[in-house]
Amino acid sequence: MEAVKKYSETELVQLLKQKQQFAFSYLYDNYSGALLSVIINIVNDTELANDVLQEVFIKIWKQIESYDELKGRLFTWMLNVARNASIDTLRSKGYQNSQQNRELTEASYDAGGTTQLQTDVMGLRKVVHQLKDEYKILIELTYFKGYTQDEISKMLSIPLGTVKTRLRTALIQLRTVIK
Amino acid sequence: MNIDTYISSGVVESYVLGLADTQEAAEMEMLIPQYPELKKAIEEFEISLEVAAFANAVTPSEDTRKQLMLALQDDFVATVIPITKSEDTPKVIPFSNTTSTTQKSWVKYLAAASVILLVASAALNVYYYSKYNEASSQVTALLNEKNNLTADNQKMQVKYLDLFGNFGLMTDPNMVKVSMPGIKGKENNLATVFWDSKTKDVYLLANKLPEAPSDKQYQLWALVDGKPVDAGMLTDCNGICKLKVIEKAQAFAITLEKKGGSPTPNLNELYVMGNVRA
């Protein structure tokens, strides 16, 4: 029995562009777990995250032509596809409605508790949670919720310039924490 | 520009995490080829993110994979199955997932195409059937018309031949023409006898005679030495009727008699009369 072949990113991308099923299977088997953790980080719901994961892999498959090796690693590209799809899901009408229902029922039991119930924070979000609050909130809102810096400036009543510099600082700190 | 300051300004993280705006990203992409240290910094952060993600990997449900493969099955290219050269025994080639899906998509296209063709041909059938009905009723009408015309034409031909024959009779130099005008009180009437001086055949042309009642018939008489001799009955002949042979006569006359004729003329019903010119 032949050992399972390992593909370099370049080889893999090329095979994916040729629409080879085994390349897709390989991609899924090797990257789905890591991508799912990122999606769960954002949508906070494993079942929903699995749905988003499916959507993400379909997007990766259909949009592989637009991936440019010169601009970054394959995983980084897929990570961004996953993040965008997750944020889109959070913002979709169906999700918002289901959240409203949930908040109503949970509010009756959890009166006084935190609005965001973080039972199992992990991955990048866990790293972010090690940052100081003023930085944490900026990364939460931009990276995990997808708000623009302009929107954040209005939401938090902080000047846009301040949001920019603080976010930069937050990102530099994130880099040191993640290493 | 001090590249080290740029690198440590947070733009690298912003770029990699997809938080950079279009302008920032464009600037970054322009600088990457120029500064290997920038590229290196980007890659380092990418890898640290990747490592963190892999460290926290969550296995997706088995259903997710199945549904995904099902959703994309028509997108995968067919994997070529190598065919060995053994010709003696036909080789059973199991349909792998990929081939069956491409066959499926083939079949789908074929099915779609055949449905379209079927609908189109059904529409044409209806169209041509109505055209056929229209044409076939037109053909029937034309055939009827043609038959009528042929019948008319035959009638005309017969009439023409008769008239031509009559014309021949009238212009025959041996023919003696006896004009019979209407007698007093019946001046409107007229008939003509053509009498062949050689064969002694008598022909009659009823130029103008009222139609005979259904129980009566016109009878031609030859006056031979003061005595009327039956010269024949007028029938429904075309134009000129051939009657009896009369050897000798000084005059001809027509009376209306009972059907089949009478042995002697009813002079009360005398219509026309004319003398044979010597």
Image: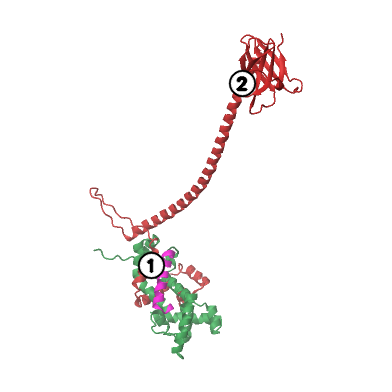
Chain colours: A green, B red
Q: Where is residue B51 in the image (x, y as percent from the top left)?
A: 36, 75
Q: Residue at x 42, y 82 (%)?
A: A128
Question: Main SS of the magenta segment?
Answer: helix
Disc 2 and disc 1 in contact, CB within 8 angstroms: no
Furthest toward the bottom, the residue is A112
Crowd band around label 2 with a 10 angstrom C-alpha radius: few (<14), some (14–19), many (20+)? some
- The picture quadrant where one finds residue B56 is bottom left
Relative height, residue B115 to residue B10 (above, below): above
Disc assigned to residue A164: none
* Residue assigned mark 2: B162
- The picture quadrant where one finds residue B161 is top right
Q: In the image, what residue type sits under mark 2?
A: Asp
Q: Distance between the residues labelled 2 and 1?
A: 98 Å
| Front residue of B109 and A156 | B109
Q: Position of residue A79 (x, y in %)?
A: 42, 72
Q: Residue at x 43, y 64 (%)?
A: A62
Crowd band around label 1 with a 10 angstrom C-alpha radius: few (<14), some (14–19), many (20+)? some
| Front residue of A102 and A152 | A102
Please, which chain is the residue tagged with disc 1 on?
Answer: B
Please, which chain is the residue tagged with disc 2 on?
Answer: B
